[in-house]
Amino acid sequence: MGMKNYPPEFKRDAVALYESRPGATIAGIAADLGISAETLRNWIRAARAEPGEPGRSGRRPRAGASGGEASLETVEAENAALRRRVRELEEERDILRKAARYFAGGDALVNRFQFVADHAGAFGVKRLCRIVGIARSSFYHWLSAAPARAERQRRDQALAEQIRAIHAEHDGTYGAPRITAELRERGRLVNRKRVERIMRAFAIVGVHLRRKVRTTVPEASGRKVADLLQRDFTADAPNRRYVGDITYLPIADGTHLYLATVIDLCSRKLAGWSIADHMRTELVADALRAAAHDRGGLDGVIFHSDHGAQYSSKQFADLCAELGVVQSMGAVGSSADNAAAESFNATLKRETLQGRTSWSTARGARLEVFRWASRYNTRRRHSRLGQRAPQTYETAFHSTSSTLASAA
């Protein structure tokens, strides 16, 4: 500053400025004031040696072993260490901000390992492991297993391609159980849980259930027919017990087609079906006649349905008598009493509509149901049949029955 003799006020203010800034150095303050560092250091010493002087309430040095004041150099060293620690904490804060992007999803521990691996060159493994809270030995073990993980990912990718192909082949309707069965039949021995895991990882999803519309309209005549199944939807052989129902097929123009079914409770085969633009008795009668034609006769079989007007009609009763069919009906208003048929209808619409609300045309609906019904009998795997198609199950059943009869 050009002054050799500084006024007392200037000295006091210089000391007060230094003591009011814990992170500052003597050299820095001296440079700001235009004086030498040694001059400022002497003023600070003098101020600390005089009780009651301004500035004594600022920095309070440690007492040394001799009971005197700690040296100014010691205080500066402590300040420098504190500044280094602040810089370290700021850097660790920035590291944690980078790490946060790794913790958005997935396995949290694996994400931490991956973060350390990706940033080890910049910050060091030891420091990063400490910051994200993992053991270095665990990290190095994970790192050593990287080749095995890469190979497992390669195998998962290859299996995912096979799953996608099967999924597409069956119009996206198959879930993990049926895809697992298909893979095993093709010679790929794979666990169902692994198939489920890969389908989740690669977003391969089957279709889901849609709402159903009521198609059962009870007949006012109230003709009494006993429930011969009592919710036992099984049969010990094909062509013994059947269930049937009507479901609607929505068309884009707001109209509907109606499908009547006749399903074998042993093999779950769709033995007969009929589509029309009405729900008159002819609809269910045509489905039953189709089943009689497919089976070569229905004499003595049980046919179970709900109490819809079509099934309760005299016309349908006469047809059953003509074919030798014994009618059975569940309780009025109870869908559980015809659950097998209800389940079939839900599956059909889930797998044909695949999330759509309707078919674009009536002709398109007829053709799609025809295609699906044919595939259902010959190719579609059924969980109740050990993941076999109905036709495959019946062939095996008759083959086994013939073998047992020959042996007897």
Image (spheres, rainbow, N blue to C red):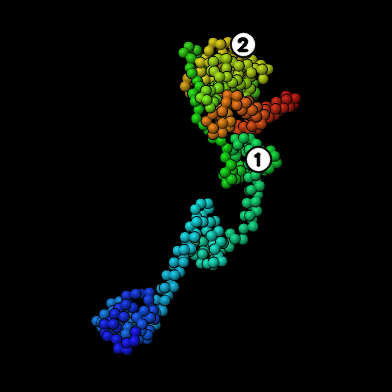
Question: Looking at the image, is 102 positioned above or below residue 367?
Answer: below
Mark 1 = which residue? 165
Q: Does residue 384 show up?
A: yes
Please state if 112 lies on the left or on the right of 61 as rendered.
right
Q: Where on the picture, by quarter, is residue 55? A: bottom left
Q: Is residue 223 left or right of residue 65?
A: right
Query: Which image quarter is the C terminus in?
Result: top right
Amino acid at circle 2: Glu
Hey, what amino acid is under mark 1?
Ala
Vertical placement of 195 versus 326: above or below?
Answer: below
Res. 407 mark: none
Q: Give residue 178's quadrant in the image.
A: top right
Residue 244 seen in this snapshot: no
For mark 2, what is the residue? 322
Report, in whole angstroms, how far the alpha carbon at label 2 lies from the one at label 1. Answer: 47 Å
Question: Which residue occupies 45% across, 69% down?
Answer: 88
What crowding class fits label 2: few (fewer than 14 Cα within 10 Å), some (14-19), or many (20 or more)? few
Question: Residue 218 location, x and y as percent?
Answer: 48, 17
Callout 1 environment at 10 Å: few (<14), some (14 to 19), or many (20+)? few
Most distant residue in the left direction: 52
Residue 139, horizontal then vertical, whole percent: 56, 61
Check the image and name the residue furthest to the front.
2
Identified at 59% across, 13% down, the residue is 320
Query: Which x, y percent locates residue 249?
Result: 55, 25
Task: Name which residue lies at 51% across and 18% down.
Answer: 308
Classify mark 1: helix, strand or loop.
helix
Question: Quarter of the image holding residue 383?
Answer: top right
